[in-house]
Image (cartoon, rainbow, N blue to C red):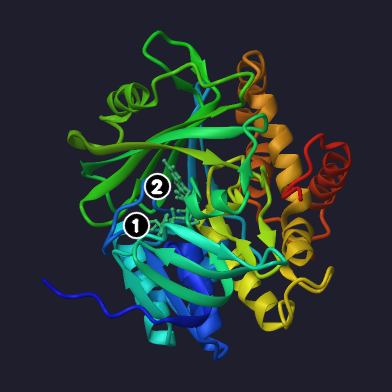
């Protein structure tokens, strides 16, 4: 067995977690010349419960990291085939600043490639090491982390430790379930249409008893003999998902078996919760910040988080390199305010309106009324895909873009729970 490299006694930036958020942060910091150590509890290549879908927004970041052709060579996805309420529609990804193509790469492969990108950039990445504690100074800044008997001193700590964010919790990061979240399950199935360049997205998701669920079913072709097939349902603490999501997945697989030429039963069925839309507080302190799922950076309308993890990693690296943490403890000059403010200015409008729209979907009456109306119009569904995939660019001036931005500003002002609250 390969022995792991020794851990350093100290490092400039310590990143906990080597998923998309941790790898991206480490890559950009290392490319900027910073000394970075990344620790991950898992041994790579490791799996992550996910749909494996890379939207155009994610592909923009994948391109920035230099992995665009690598991902496109695996499979290029042109858009969504939406089905439901007696109709089906093909909606290409919106063209424009986000590029207009997507892809899908299983996470055992994608995350391993991202990890290697961080190593190539100069980061020290050590997997199989679980961070078990943090040490703090008088001003609340983190001075060191503990991993069992090992202690590593650090100047800056990045929490990229995923949905549960165990290290974030030690520092007071809290997830608020009164705001909309999702429960989702994925599987892999052999398919005669594994290289079909369109994502299947079923908006009329029904359980075995025929009850409509506030969510959708997906089939993401992987181009390697299998598809990623899954289901996700929205919930809040007052309206919890009333469905066993793995049963729902098997039922959904039966309903699309012929269309997708599925061969065999879904395998590797796993499920997970998704905090969404910045529904967390305590995402930063004097010299530490949470990124990716740890900061609930997941789009409430489609459950994507890879793009926000990659994007967030780049933004956080830029903030750290800008000198925002030059001296810890100075109000307004450190990450405590700077990071949540940057998250709010980047995602505030789009996450606030997406949270409201997703909350509407959890009302049992809403989808049966709105679904058939939406599916009747190609123009409406094209606009819906553009808004749901958050590919309305700031520079877009058309009616849909203006309307979406205006609705986002209003939603932010009316929000009972501010995003990324202190
Ligand atoms: C069913 C499902 C389907 C989804 N489908 C999609 C999709 O198709 N497209 C999309 O864009 N998003 C999708 N998402 C969301 C996406 O999976 C996440 O947003 C994304 O993985 C976030 O990346 P991350 O780097 O923040 O966290 P993760 O990828 O979860 O990485 C966190 C890392 O931290 C490590 N870690 C945790 N604790 C410690 C510790 N104490 N010490 C050391 N290491 C630690 C873990 O081992 C892990 O490797 C889906 C999610 C679910 C649940």
Q: Which numbered tag is attached to residue 235?
A: none
Confirm if mark 2 falls within 8 A of ligand 1.
Answer: yes
Residue at the limit of the structure toward the bottom, as seen here: 33
Q: Position of residue 40 (x, y in %)?
A: 37, 64
Q: Residue 50: which disc?
A: 2
Q: CA distance from mark 1 to mark 2?
A: 7 Å
Q: Secondary structure at mark 2?
A: loop
Query: x, y percentage for residue 93?
Result: 56, 54
Q: Secondary structure at mark 1?
A: helix
Q: Nearer the viewer, residue 196 or 408?
A: 408
Where is 66 relative to 422, above or below? Answer: below
336 relative position to 143: left or right: right
Residue, disc 1: 107
Q: Is residue 278 visible?
A: yes
Classify mark 1 as within 8 Å of ligand 1 or not, answering yes or no: yes
In the rendered image, the residue lying farthest to the left is 1
Is 259 drawn above or below residue 98 in the view shown?
Answer: above
Instruction: Please report whichever mark, 1 or 2, sits nearer to the chain's N-terminal start.
Output: 2
């Amino acid at each position: 067995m390969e022995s792991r490299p020794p851990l350093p006694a100290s490092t400039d930036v310590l990143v906990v977690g080597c998923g998309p958020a941790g790898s991206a942060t480490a890559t950009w910091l290392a490319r900027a010349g910073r000394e970075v150590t990344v620790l991950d509890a898992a041994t790579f290549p490791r799996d992550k419960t996910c749909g494996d879908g890379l939207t155009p927004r994610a592909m923009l970041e994948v391109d920035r990291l230099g992995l665009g052709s690598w991902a496109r060579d695996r499979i290029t996805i042109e858009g969504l085939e939406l089905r439901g309420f007696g109709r089906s529609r093909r909606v290409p990804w919106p063209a424009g600043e986000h590029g207009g193509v997507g892809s899908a790469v299983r996470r055992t492969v994608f995350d391993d490639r991202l990890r290697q990108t961080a190593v190539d950039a100069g980061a020290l990445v050590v997997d199989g090491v679980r961070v078990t504690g943090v040490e703090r100074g008088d001003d609340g800044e983190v001075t060191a982390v503990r991993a069992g008997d090992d202690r590593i001193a650090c100047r800056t700590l990045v929490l990229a430790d995923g949905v549960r964010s165990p290290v974030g919790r030690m520092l007071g990061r809290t997830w608020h379930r009164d705001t909309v979240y999702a429960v989702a399950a994925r599987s892999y199935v052999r398919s005669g249409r594994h290289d079909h360049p369109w994502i299947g997205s079923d908006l009329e998701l029904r359980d075995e008893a025929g009850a409509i669920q506030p969510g959708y079913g997906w089939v993401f072709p992987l181009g390697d003999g299998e598809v990623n097939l899954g289901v996700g349902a929205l919930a809040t603490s007052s309206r919890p998902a009333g469905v066993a999501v793995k049963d729902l997945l098997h039922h959904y697989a039966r309903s699309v078996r012929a269309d997708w030429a599925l061969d065999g039963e879904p395998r590797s069925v796993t499920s997970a919760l998704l905090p969404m839309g910045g529904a967390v507080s305590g995402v930063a302190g004097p010299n530490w910040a949470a990124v990716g799922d740890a900061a609930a950076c997941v789009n409430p309308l489609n459950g994507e988080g890879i793009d926000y993890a990659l994007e967030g990693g780049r933004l956080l690296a830029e903030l750290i390199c800008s000198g925002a943490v030059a001296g810890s403890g100075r109000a307004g000059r450190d990450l405590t305010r700077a990071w949540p403010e940057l998250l709010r200015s980047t995602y505030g409008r789009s996450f606030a309106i997406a949270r409201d729209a997703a909350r509407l979907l959890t009302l049992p009456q809403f989808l049966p009324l709105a679904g058939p109306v939406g599916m009747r119009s190609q123009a409406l569904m094209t606009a819906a895909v553009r808004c749901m995939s958050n590919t309305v660019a700031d520079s877009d001036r058309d009616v849909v873009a203006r309307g979406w931005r205006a609705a986002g500003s209003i939603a932010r002002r009316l929000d009972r729970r501010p995003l990324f609250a202190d």
